[in-house]
Image: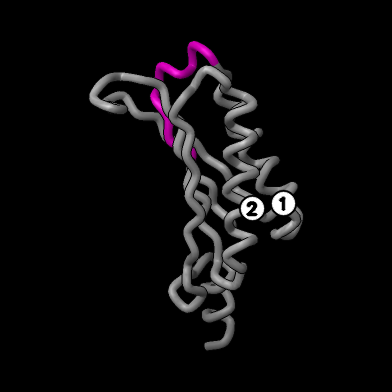
């Protein structure tokens, strides 16, 4: 945790290297100091069919999924840091947005949790 899901048009590749975009988001989240080293995961989902304001226009939307427990101020700072990183990388893209979504810990699982359950049985 956290998981950063970046969404943008596939044709944005004309103006940015996608590896650089993923790295910029990853590094902004990691630099927040809210997460342990090595915990940040980032991935890119490309859209081929989309509209922004009724036309095909570039955009980048990032959802940052985090476990509950962070303050509203921490979440706002995190969203701002990611938005700033993307805006600095892509100054010509007018539609840049970020949302931070909290996940209730009791509804989250992963391999480590499942393994711990198996070992307890």
Hey, which quadrant is residue 27 in on the image? top right
Figure check: 55 above or below 84: above
Other residues around mark 2 within 10 Å, as few (<14) / some (14–19) / many (≥20) = some
Image position of 33 (left or right of 20): right
Image position of 20 (left or right of 107): right
- Residue located 49% across and 11% down the image: 14
How many angstroms separate mark 1 from mark 2 (CA)? 8 Å
Q: Are marks 1 and 2 in contact (CB under 8 Å)?
A: yes
Q: Is residue 8 magenta?
A: yes
Residue 111, given in percent of the width and then of the height, sits at: 54, 65
How many callouts does the rendering have?
A: 2
| Residue extent of the magenta highlight | 6-15
Residue 87, given in percent of the width and then of the height, sits at: 58, 29
Figure check: 27 above or below 2: above
Q: Nearer the viewer, residue 33 or 120?
A: 33
Q: State the residue position of label 2.
A: 77
Q: Is residue 62 magenta?
A: no
Q: Nearer the viewer, mark 1 or mark 2?
A: 2
Hey, which quadrant is residue 48 in on the image? top left
Figure check: 78 above or below 85: below
Q: State the residue position of label 1.
A: 32
Question: The N terminus is located in which quarter?
Answer: bottom right
Residue 85, given in percent of the width and then of the height, sits at: 64, 34
Q: Nearer the viewer, residue 89 or 8?
A: 89
- Residue located 44% across and 29% down the image: 95
Query: Which secondary structure, mark 1?
Result: loop
Instruction: State which tag comes first along the sequence, 1 or 2.
Output: 1
- Residue located 48% across and 67% down the image: 103
Q: Nearer the viewer, residue 13 or 95?
A: 95
Figure check: 41 above or below 119: above
């Amino acid at each position: 945790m956290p998981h950063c899901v970046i969404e943008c048009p596939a044709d944005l590749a004309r103006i940015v290297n996608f590896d650089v975009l993923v790295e910029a988001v990853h590094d902004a989240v990691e630099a927040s100091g809210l997460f342990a080293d090595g915990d940040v995961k980032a991935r890119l989902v490309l859209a081929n069919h989309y509209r922004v304001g009724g036309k095909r226009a570039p955009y980048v939307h990032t959802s940052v999924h985090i476990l509950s427990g962070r303050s509203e101020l921490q979440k706002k700072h995190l969203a701002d840091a990611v938005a700033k990183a993307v805006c600095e990388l892509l100054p010509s893209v007018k539609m840049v947005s970020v949302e931070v979504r909290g996940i209730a810990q009791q509804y989250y699982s992963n391999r480590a949790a499942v393994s711990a359950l198996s070992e307890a049985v």
